[in-house]
Image: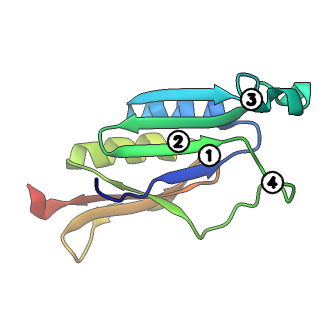
Amino acid sequence: MMTSINSYLTFAGNCREAMTFYQSCLGGELSFQTIGASPLSEKMPEKMKGYILHATLTNGLIRIMASDMVGSEGLLKGNAVSLMLNCSTEAEARSCYERLAAGGTATHPLEDSFWGALFGDLKDKYGNNWLLHFDKNQQ
């Protein structure tokens, strides 16, 4: 089995909303496990039982995981992590960029790069950074 790495996002109560948005942008199968349906249920306050303990969105080689389980320090948004989306066609890159940027900030619109790719980045409406890439040499 090949070692792999997946993105794992943390939200503060809006994991279901965000992951449903990502599914509408990227397609795929989405699953949720709530705190209330887990062994943690008895130890958590009633208001947290609808929160997401673990979510997974899978579409081919794309796998994004997420949770509402924020540590005691609270949710800290930074720019140290981005989600890199390698697209298989130019049309897919343009479509995904447009959908993911909706309600967010198109920080670097898609453009032809010096390395032969269509590339751009954005910050989505949940504050997460995305890099979109289509290698024009793969056609």
Who comes first in sequence, dot 3 or dot 2?
3
Who comes first in sequence, dot 1 or dot 3?
3
Q: Amino acid at mark 3?
A: Pro
Spatial CA distance of label 1 from label 2 is: 7 Å
| Residue 108 horizontal/vertical position (percent) | 45, 64
Point out the frontmost of discs 1 and 3. Answer: 3
| Residue 129 horizontal/vertical position (percent) | 54, 58
Point out the frontmost of discs 3 and 2. Answer: 3
Are the two marked residues, 1 and 3, in contact with CB atoms closer than 8 angstroms?
A: no
In the picture, the disc for residue 39 is: 3
Who comes first in sequence, dot 4 or dot 3?
3
Point out the frontmost of discs 1 and 2. Answer: 1
Q: Quadrant of residue 19?
A: top right
Label 2: element kind: loop
| Residue 69 horizontal/vertical position (percent) | 74, 44
What residue does disc 4 label? 71
What residue does disc 2 label? 102
Point out the frontmost of discs 2 and 4. Answer: 4
Label 3: element kind: helix
State the residue at coordinates (38%, 62%). Answer: 120
Instruction: Give 81 or 102, whichever is nearer the viewer.
Output: 81
Who comes first in sequence, dot 2 or dot 4?
4
